[in-house]
Amino acid sequence: MTVDRERGQATVELVALLPLVMFVALAAATVLAGQAAAEQAGQAAEAGAIAMLQGRDPAPAARAAIPARTRASITRAGSRITVTVRPPVPLTLLASALEATATADAGPEPAP
């Protein structure tokens, strides 16, 4: 008789745990998007600095180093370029917290 009563137990447990599993997967995707934003900001700042060293406008070079869907701001102050990337994340409340900023300098190296 106990076998008949326990028939749907696994289904009930799966349904109860499914929202938790989905939340953990969503959180992991959000953290990975934040890490990707940091990498993208660094690459874009470096691309902009290289463009400055070559005598070109750094903004298009930095923008080309960032995926099209990604929101970013690019600023230039003298020989320094700063790129801030806000990743496209599923949890939009965390988007501003996961913003990544990187700076690259195209000027001469400081003397030791």
Image (tube, rainbow, N blue to C red):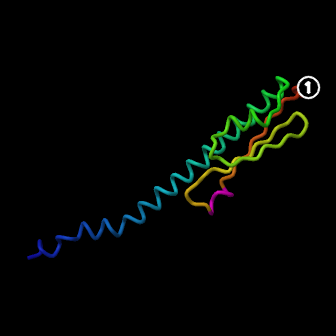
- What residue lies at 17% left-to-right and 70% top-to-bottom? 7
Query: Is 31 in front, or is 2?
Result: 31
Q: Amino acid at mark 1?
A: Ala
Name the residue beneath numbered marker 1.
111
Q: Residue 6 at x, y = what percent?
A: 17, 72
SS for callout 1? loop
Query: Is 36 in front, or is 69?
Result: 69
Q: Residue furthest top?
A: 54
Name the dominant secondary structure of the magenta segment.
loop
Query: Is 88 in front, or is 21?
Result: 88
Q: In terms of image quadrants, where is residue 82?
A: top right
The relative height of residue 61 versus residue 36 in the rendered view (above or below) is above
- What residue lies at 52% left-to-right and 57% top-to-bottom? 27
Q: Residue 4 at x, y = what percent?
A: 12, 74
- What residue lies at 12% left-to-right and 75% top-to-bottom? 2
- What residue lies at 85% left-to-right and 40% top-to-bottom? 76
Give the position of the C terminus as an image quadrant: top right
Instruction: Report whether 17 appears left or right of 29.
Output: left
Query: Is 27 in front, or is 95?
Result: 95
Asked whether 10 falls inside the magenta stretch, the response is no
Callout count = 1
Range of residues picked out in magenta? 93-97
Q: Residue 14 at x, y = what percent?
A: 31, 65
Q: In terms of image quadrants, where is residue 53?
A: top right
Q: Residues within 10 Å of mark 1 (few under 14, many from 20)?
A: few
Asked whether 95 falls inside the magenta stretch, the response is yes
